[in-house]
Amino acid sequence: MVQVNWKRLAEPHPLFKPFVPTDLNDIGFYKKLVVFKKNLLTKYLYVSDEFRNIQYIEKVLSRYILSGGKHILYEIGDFGGIAGFVDILPGFKCDAIMKLWDRDIWGLDCIKAYKKLLDIVMDEFRLKRIGTSTADEKIVRMAKMAGFVEEGTQKCGFMWKGKPMDYMLLGYYKEG
């Protein structure tokens, strides 16, 4: 059994703070959740056509937020995006998501902070691999700057407004 330092995960870097309701009446959190859902529905290449409907997105987000540690989401900056680690299998692997809608956050400081967050999650859950995937070339470049390596491409694996696009698969591995 993997012992996790939840305090370390709760305070990984000033740019990242846990995206969880502080109480059941946290209106601010639910307003942010509405913005997040809207971004998932509308932002370019955030979600493939077959999953871009409110029922699916609400189901997935509910699972991520109410999972009790199997998924961890972080607010980036002053809610300029979301970074998350989902389907965590301690001692083995998880998948990473990153949705950044405030372009002012983007930069070398964000990449360094994200790499630190990746390493903390790897350490705390004793992971061998963190995977991610995207159809967005800009996200591929950002992921590579953070230490991900390109593993392959699913030809026509993503659909945006009826147009098939290639879906890049990336992995992050701890050195050593």
Image (spheres, rainbow, N blue to C red):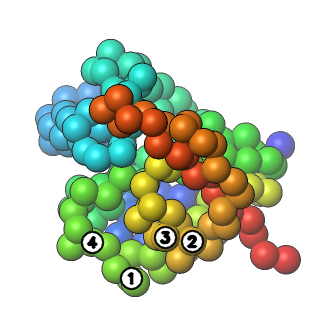
- The residue closer to the viewer here, 176 or 38, is 38
Element at badge 2?
helix
Asked whether, in this view, residue 166 is left or right of residue 91, the answer is left
- Label at residue 141: 3
In percent of width and height, residue 65 lies at 42, 33
Residue 105: mark: 4
Single out the residue that lies furthest toward the bottom: 108
Which residue is nearer to you in this view: 113 or 53? 53
The answer to which image quadrant residue 137 occupies is bottom left
- Is disc 3 surrounded by few (<14), some (14 to 19) or many (20+) residues within 10 Å? few
Q: Position of residue 86 (x, y in %)?
A: 56, 41
User: Contact, CB < 8 Å: mark 3 with mark 2?
Assistant: yes
| Mark 3 to mark 2 CA distance (whole Å) | 5 Å
Residue 24, relative to residue 102: is it above or below? above
User: Is residue 29 something that shows in the picture?
Assistant: no
Give the spatial CA distance, label 4 vs label 1. 8 Å
Query: What residue is rendered at 38% in x and 19% in y?
Result: 56
Q: Which residue is denoted by mark 1 in the rendering?
A: 109
- Residue at 23%, 68% in the rendered image: 103
Q: Alpha carbon of mark 3 to alpha carbon of mark 4: how far?
A: 16 Å
Looking at the rendered structure, the secondary structure element under dot 1 is helix
Q: In which quadrant will I find the C terminus?
A: bottom right
Circle 2 sits on which residue? 144
Residue at the (83%, 43%) spot, across then down: 1
Residue furthest top as drawn? 55
Say few, some or many: other residues with alpha carbon within 10 Å of mark 2 (under 14 / 14 to 19 / 20 or more): some
Asked if residue 46 is positioned above or below residue 168 in the image, the reply reads above
At mark 4, the secondary structure is loop
Looking at marks 1 and 2 on the same chain, the residue that comes earlier in the sequence is marked by 1
> What residue type is disc 4 on?
Ile
For marks 4 and 2, the one nearer the N-term is: 4
